[in-house]
Image: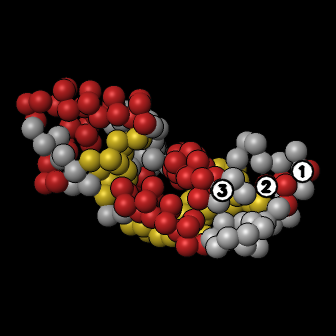
């Protein structure tokens, strides 16, 4: 049974567009994203000793990982799909070399699930993912970026159970760990 959970939130400012959207979201725009990461204690066991005694994971450790894997590469940048060639072409630092630049970015996305770069026109901070940067896809993406660092920073006690991405004060999307079964203890 998973009895304990903790949640940490950070906020970032980032631009994006949903290129296939049938309305205004297909245009380049920005959000003040709120990102929440929830961790549960594996087997309802808190840390038994050390600096995390009686904790799922130290809030500051969780914040460190969120800042490293979400804030640092994404805050005040553009989050773009690797398939959004029109927008990426606008950002290419050397327009005559777009095909090679795009191939390099897509290669990094294929290998690491993302490409974070400032090798762009005007040195714009760019974060490229495989899917469109919808709240749903960002929640899943950031979940996968955080899951292993959370496990490591908690010495295996914490399981990342959910990432929630607030796109506006009224709208959010969740990605829930497919292995997390809540209160069944499985």
Q: Which dot marks residue 127?
A: none
Question: What residue is shown with label 3?
Answer: 155
Residue projecting furthest to the front: 50
Q: Distance between the residues labelled 3 and 1?
A: 20 Å
* Of the image marks 3 and 1, the number of the one nearer the N terminus: 3
Please say whether residue 20 is visible from this viewpoint.
Answer: no
Mark 2 or 3, which is nearer the eye? 3
The residue nearer to you, when weighing 3 against 87, is 3
Look at 34% across and 42% down and name the residue there.
115
Q: In this view, does 98 lie above or below 134?
A: above
Seen from the viewer's position, the closer of residues 51 and 28 is 51
Which residue position holds label 1?
185
Q: Tag 3, which secondary structure? A: loop
Q: Which of 170 and 121 is in front in this view?
A: 121
Question: Measuring 26% from the left and 55% from the top, which residue is drawn there?
Answer: 125
How far across and how far down the image is residue 38, in percent?
67, 62
Asked if residue 10 lies left or right of residue 118, the reply is right
**Residue 89, percent across and down?**
20, 37
Mark 1 touches mark 2? (CB < 8 Å): no
Q: Dividing the picture into quarters, in which one does residue 46 lie?
A: bottom right
Q: Which of the 4 image quadrants contains residue 97?
A: top left
Give whichever of discs 1 and 2 has the lower sequence position.
Answer: 2
Look at the image and tell me in which quarter the N terminus lies: bottom right
Q: What element carries label 1?
A: loop
Q: Which of marks 2 and 3 is nearer the N terminus?
A: 2
Q: Is residue 89 visible?
A: yes
- Crowd around label 1: few <14 · some 14–19 · many ≥20 (10 Å): few
- Look at mark 2 in the image and give the residue it sits on: 42
Q: Along the horizontal axis of the image, is 29 left or right of 163? A: left
């Amino acid at each position: 049974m998973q009895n304990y959970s903790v949640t940490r939130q950070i906020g970032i400012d980032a631009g994006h567009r949903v290129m296939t959207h049938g309305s205004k979201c297909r245009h380049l725009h920005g959000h003040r994203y709120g990102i929440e990461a929830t961790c549960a204690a594996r087997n309802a066991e808190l840390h038994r000793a050390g600096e995390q005694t009686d904790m799922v994971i130290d809030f500051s450790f969780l914040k460190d990982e969120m800042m490293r894997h979400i804030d640092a590469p994404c805050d005040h940048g553009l989050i773009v799909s690797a398939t959004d060639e029109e927008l990426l072409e606008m950002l290419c630092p050397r327009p005559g070399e777009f095909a090679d630049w795009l191939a390099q970015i897509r290669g990094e996305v294929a290998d690491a699930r993302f490409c974070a770069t400032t090798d762009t026109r005007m040195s714009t901070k760019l974060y490229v993912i495989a899917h469109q940067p919808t709240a749903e896809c960002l929640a899943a993406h950031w979940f996968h970026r955080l899951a292993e660092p959370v496990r490591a920073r908690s010495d295996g006690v914490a399981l990342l159970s959910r990432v929630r991405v607030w796109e506006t004060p009224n709208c959010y999307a969740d990605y829930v760990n497919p292995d997390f079964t809540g209160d069944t203890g499985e």
